[in-house]
Image: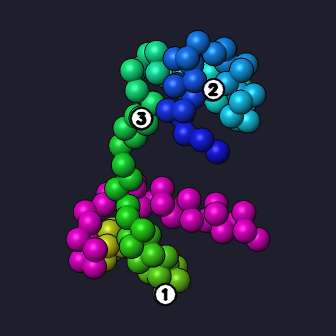
Amino acid sequence: MQTASTNICERMCNKSVCEIFLLLNIPRSTVSGIITKWKQLGTTATQPQSGRPRKMTERGQLILQCTMHRSHQLPVETIAKDLQTSCGLQISTPTICRELHGMIYIADQLH
């Protein structure tokens, strides 16, 4: 499969979208999208990630899982302190609750 810049080069050579997608054997919507993006932004590079990055790291999630496997009855505040001492992450109790609910949802999907 050829790159997006090849699509643009073909477009610059006065070829239609239909001719380009037939030449390159890629979907018409992809060709149209790349050409539109080129016209709007002047580039086909991807845009920066939207939204805020997650506070909980993968390491934090593993520690949270291990903590929950050891004892299921720990208060969330204690878990937050454990995460802060072991990972150096200061994570709020609502964030921990959200992560725990997400883990339960994923576990339910696997069974």
Three-letter amino acid code at disc 1? Arg
The x, y position of residue 105, in whole percent, is 64, 60
Three-letter amino acid code at disc 3? Ala
Q: If the image is split into quadrants, where does the N terminus sit?
A: top right
Task: Find residue 70 and name its label.
Answer: 1
**Residue at horizontal 45 percent and vertical 30 percent from the top:** 44
Vertical placement of 100 versus 49: above or below? below
Q: Secondary structure at mark 3?
A: loop
Task: Find residue 57 and name its label.
Answer: none
Specify the quadrant of the image occupied by residue 75: bottom left
Residue 30 lies in the magenta-colored region:
no
Q: Residues within 10 Å of mark 2 (few under 14, many from 20)?
A: many
Which stretch appears magenta? 84-111
Q: Residues within 10 Å of mark 1 (few under 14, many from 20)?
A: few
Residue 93 lies in the magenta-colored region:
yes
Task: Find residue 45 and name its label.
Answer: 3
* Residue in the foreground of this view, choosing between 57 and 49: 49
Q: Secondary structure at mark 1?
A: helix
Task: Find residue 31 and name its label.
Answer: 2
Main SS of the magenta segment? helix
Estimate the spatial distance between the alpha carbons at disc 1 and disc 3, rounded to whole Å: 46 Å
Q: Secondary structure at mark 2?
A: helix
**Residue at horizontal 56 percent and vertical 59 percent from the top:** 102
